[in-house]
Image (cartoon, rainbow, N blue to C red):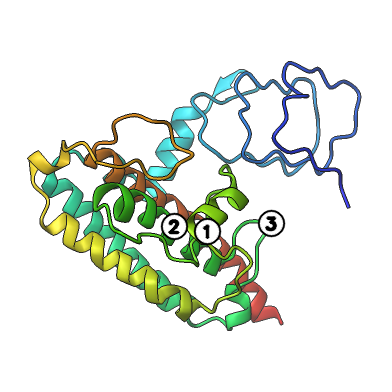
Amino acid sequence: MPAEYTQGDQFRGARIHLCDLSGLEIRDCDVTGLKIVDCYGGNVSLGGGFERVVVNDVDVTAYVEAELDRLHPNRVLAREATSAAEYRAAWDAIEKQWEETLDRARRLPEAKLNEQVDGEWSFVETQRHLLMASDAWIGNAVLEEDAPHHSLGLPGGGMPAEALAKLLGLTLDATPTLDEVLAPRLARMATMRRVVDELTEAELDRVCGRKPADPYPDKDYVVRRCLSVVFKEEAEHHRYAVRDLTVLEADTRTE
């Protein structure tokens, strides 16, 4: 079992020299100012929200973003929506892509839908996380529902999962089928459809009466920001889901 370091700052400003870091995984960390110099190896993978990435003195940030937008155009719709009509158009596209991807996923055995690829969330876990995102940012913040959180919701990796589970009544160790997760998940998507269909410019600028969840800072949360967060989550996690579905489909063909 490899060593694991969680919620600490013992590596801040550290210099690691002449060490074997093969297989090292850094997840849900602030890596601002990270430098990897004169190192070597194969199969290096980076993923996350980076403001600027330089590889061998070449700034590749704009290239990576442009390529992601080309491959996943709904990222652009989700990111750039500002008017009520643009939010509706973005949600139309998100609904359509998930309808197609769910049809694709259903062709795999149920066990594959609960299988993780390279340690990432399984397809079912991804649906659980998107359920949680909708519950927090729409059900709780925008709509101020009495009981917005479904027990199958799954917090993001950077959040205090155990504390949130206790606070919100989440069952983190649940092992639901895809259909069991999709029952509340599709209901939340239908709620989002209603929200965007009724959206006005004034509503977009309304300050919500609640924040998404207790770990978030105490500040004003405007409806447009809440919508944008959910739209971005939908677009990015769809990207991850189809990436891993490709691997699972290939595995199924060779078994």
Name the residue tied to disc 2: 132
Q: Kindly identify the residue that appears in the image at 45 percent across and 41 percent down.
A: 214
Q: Kindly identify the residue that appears in the image at 57 percent across and 21 percent down.
A: 58
Give the Cα distance between marks 1 and 3: 16 Å
Query: Disc 2 vs disc 3: Cβ atoms closer than 8 Å?
Result: no
Sequence-wise, which precedes: disc 1 or disc 3?
Answer: 3
Amino acid on which disc 2 is placed: Met
Percent of width and height locating residue 66: 40, 37
Give the Cα distance between marks 1 and 2: 6 Å
Percent of width and height locating residue 184: 38, 71
Neighbor class of circle 2 (other Cα within 10 Å; few <14, some 14-19, many 20+) is many
Give the Cα distance between marks 2 and 3: 20 Å
Name the residue tied to disc 1: 154
Q: In the structure shown, which secondary structural element does the residue marked by tag 2 occupy? A: helix
Tell me if I can see residue 73 in this picture: no
Q: Quadrant of the C terminus?
A: bottom right
Q: In the structure shown, which secondary structural element does the residue marked by tag 1 occupy? A: loop
Residue 119 disc label = 3
Neighbor class of circle 3 (other Cα within 10 Å; few <14, some 14-19, many 20+) is few
Mark 2 or mark 3, whichever is nearer to me: 2
